[in-house]
Image: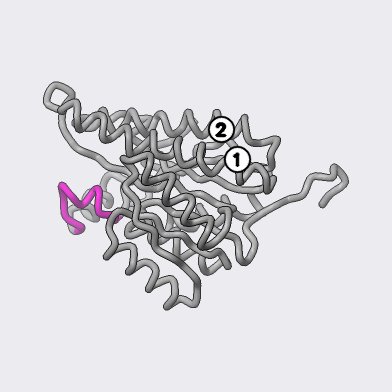
């Protein structure tokens, strides 16, 4: 508390953090990092094997986590999973909307079904998750939301208009919700990661090729790692970021410069 009477709030030991797409990549790194900060993790994922592995790793690190299977393309499934998470753990302090899909194709070749699936998972699901959990978080008068965007939201993406459009929408949702929820003590920010060693970019290339490309094209000469991005999330949930909301923060080695 300071002379203005506004508490500088951050993640506390025992707080609950929901991580969508927590079964691998950025999601697994978020889960492990926040668990080391004392959070109890709700790992949301459609893949039970990968989700269970994240829980095992969190527990191996000395943390606490539970797995919840959810299909983010299904609103009823999201509502069920939210209720089960609150019953098993508590109202979340932190929600990380990390999960996304990226069916690739040029606009003239992309099917309407692929376009609609991308929007259901990448932007409608975060909206509905926050709409569902929002009233309970508002009651608590504290909380943090982190939405995962992408450099493609800024640059666009050949063979990825669907993905780029959803990630641009994530940035707009972040700004709008930050304005709505600031008075409730809830901060809403977005992370804009660059090319990193996760499953999505490796669908169309190899780890060796990614490293080689980064050495010549990235200003810092390397690719990103999930742990890099998890470090930024750790800052955003902490009291050190108590005056920060509505921002899209890029972490990409200087590859995409955000104004």
Q: Which residue is the extreme one toward the right?
A: 3
- Look at the image and tell me whether residue 225 can be seen: no
Q: Nearer the viewer, residue 106 or 71?
A: 71
Can you say whether 113 is above or below 219 in the image?
above
What is the quadrant of residue 23 in the picture?
A: bottom left
Q: CA distance from mark 2 to mark 1?
A: 13 Å
Residue at image position (63%, 35%) is 181
**Residues in magenta?**
197-207
Q: Is residue 134 left or right of residue 206?
A: right
Q: Are marks 2 and 1 in contact (CB under 8 Å)?
A: no
Residue sitting at x 24%, y 48%: 201
> Looking at the image, which is closer to me, 208 or 35?
35
In the rendered image, residue 199, in percent from the top left (x then y), is placed at: 25, 54
250 sits to left or right of 89: left
* Residue 211 seen anywhere in this rendered image of the structure: yes
Q: Which residue is mark 2?
A: 177
Could you say where residue 89 lies in the image, as x and y percent from the top left? 54, 62
Please say whether residue 188 is one of the residues in the magenta stretch.
Answer: no
| Residue 105 placement (x, y as % from top left) | 15, 32
Left or right placement of residue 148 versus residue 211 in this view: right
| Residue 100 falls in image quadrant | top left
Estimate how packed mark 2 is, as few (under 14), some (14 to 19) or many (20 or more) residues with alpha carbons within 10 Å: some
Q: Label 1: which residue?
A: 135
């Amino acid at each position: 508390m300071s002379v203005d009477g506004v508490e500088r709030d951050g993640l506390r030991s025992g707080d609950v953090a929901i991580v969508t797409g927590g079964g691998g990549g950025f999601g697994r790194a978020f889960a492990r990092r926040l668990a080391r900060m004392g959070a109890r993790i709700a790992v949301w994922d459609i893949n039970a094997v990968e989700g269970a592995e994240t829980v095992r790793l969190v527990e191996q690190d000395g943390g606490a986590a539970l797995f919840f299977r959810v299909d983010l393309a299904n609103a009823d499934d999201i509502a069920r999973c939210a209720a089960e998470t609150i019953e098993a753990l508590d109202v979340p302090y932190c929600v990380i909307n990390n999960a996304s899909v990226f069916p690739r194709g040029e606009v003239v070749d992309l099917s309407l079904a692929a376009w609609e699936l991308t929007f259901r998972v990448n932007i409608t699901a975060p909206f509905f998750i926050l709409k569902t959990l929002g009233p309970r978080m508002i009651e608590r008068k504290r909380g943090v939301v982190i939405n995962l965007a992408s450099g493609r939201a800024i640059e666009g993406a050949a063979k990825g208009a669907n993905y780029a459009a959803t990630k641009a929408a994530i940035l707009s949702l972040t700004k709008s919700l930050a304005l709505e929820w600031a008075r409730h003590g809830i901060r809403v920010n977005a992370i804009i990661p660059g090319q990193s060693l996760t499953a999505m970019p490796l669908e169309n290339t190899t780890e060796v090729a990614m490293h080689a490309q980064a050495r010549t094209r990235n200003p810092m000469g390397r690719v990103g790692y999930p742990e890099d991005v998890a470090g930024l999330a750790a800052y955003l949930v902490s009291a050190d970021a108590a005056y920060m909301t509505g921002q899209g923060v890029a972490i990409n080695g200087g590859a995409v410069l955000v104004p």
